[in-house]
Image: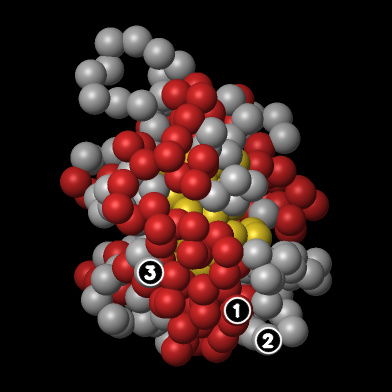
Amino acid sequence: MVKYQGNMMSLRKFVAGNWKMNGTGENLAEVRAIAEGAAGYSSVDCALCLPATLIERAVRAAPGFAIGGQDMHQAASGAHTGSISASMLVDCGATLTIVGHSERREEQHESDAQIRAKAETAIAAGLQVIVCVGESDSVRGAGQAVATVAAQLDSSLPQSEGAAAQLAVAYEPIWAIGTGKVPSIGDIGEMHAALRQRLIRAYGEAGRSVRILYGGSVKAANAAEIFAVPDVDGALVGGASLKAVEFVPIVVAANPADG
């Protein structure tokens, strides 16, 4: 068990939605509704990471609201059919991107080195980056969750100058994504404490300002309890981010006056 009392620095909560392969033009009304609902909680940073086909339209539909991508290629340009570059995301109006989501790591066999390269390319283009890490059910069952995820983070972190200022880390246990299962509060706290220590080791004092998000079956019903855990600085939300009626209450739970 990691013995850690939590980050002494109070960080603004950050709640980001990941729509994954969901959403067409008819869903822009939900983007607007989420943006309008989140606007009432100015002490919480909020964003939606959308399919590439929706980014530009979402930026127009919800001016001033943070819209991001879900992935990007590590190369600036070139012969990479079907891929999207960091500059393309910026050109669409995106301000952030996810890299290293477990569904990319598993389905597309992305390595830690590839994810680090993506993060560094994104940061160089001026994008904020959410780097995802997480363990499988078998790793958790073998008692190797903390060691495995910490090593994964070490190998995935961008090393470019000033990277910490543009970075968030999302801990998403693979076995909790979309399953309704959630780790115990103690397990979440232990993992986030370990990740904070790794961030400080990598970036020095700047590592204290990197927000660590929890992801994996986050809902309005459990968000407040999760946000109360030391070093849980927000959430990366999947299915519950598709509808304003489900996502905005998570933002409310992250608000210091209400959470």
Q: Is residue 221 above or below residue 12?
A: below
Q: Amino acid at mark 2?
A: Asp
Q: Position of residue 61 (x, y in %)?
A: 49, 47
Of helix, strand and loop, which one carries label 2?
loop
Instruction: Classify mark 3: helix, strand or loop.
Output: loop
Residue 20: give x, y in percent of width and height.
Answer: 30, 53
As drawn, which residue projects farthest toward the top? 78
Which residue is labeled 1 in the image?
Answer: 252
> How far, Cα to Cα, is label 3 from label 2?
20 Å
Sequence-first tag of 2 and 1: 1
Query: Mark 2 near mark 1, Cβ–Cβ under 8 Å?
Result: yes
Disc 2/disc 1 C-alpha distance (Å): 6 Å
* Above or below for 41 versus 21: below
Q: Are marks 3 and 2 in contact (CB under 8 Å)?
A: no
Q: Which residue is mark 3?
A: 243
Residue under label 2, please give it: 258
Q: Looking at the image, can residue 195 be seen? A: no
User: What residue is shown at x 28% (from left), y 11% (from top)?
Assistant: 79
Dot 2: within a 10 Å radius of its alpha carbon, few (fewer than 14), some, or many (20 or more) residues?
A: few
Q: Amino acid at mark 3?
A: Lys
Q: Earlier in the sequence, mark 1 or mark 3?
A: 3
Which residue is at 51% across, 25% downward?
91
Please state which of residues 154 and 211 is positioned toward the viewer in this rendering: 211
Q: Residues within 10 Å of mark 3 (few under 14, many from 20)?
A: some
| Residue 209 falls in image quadrant | bottom right
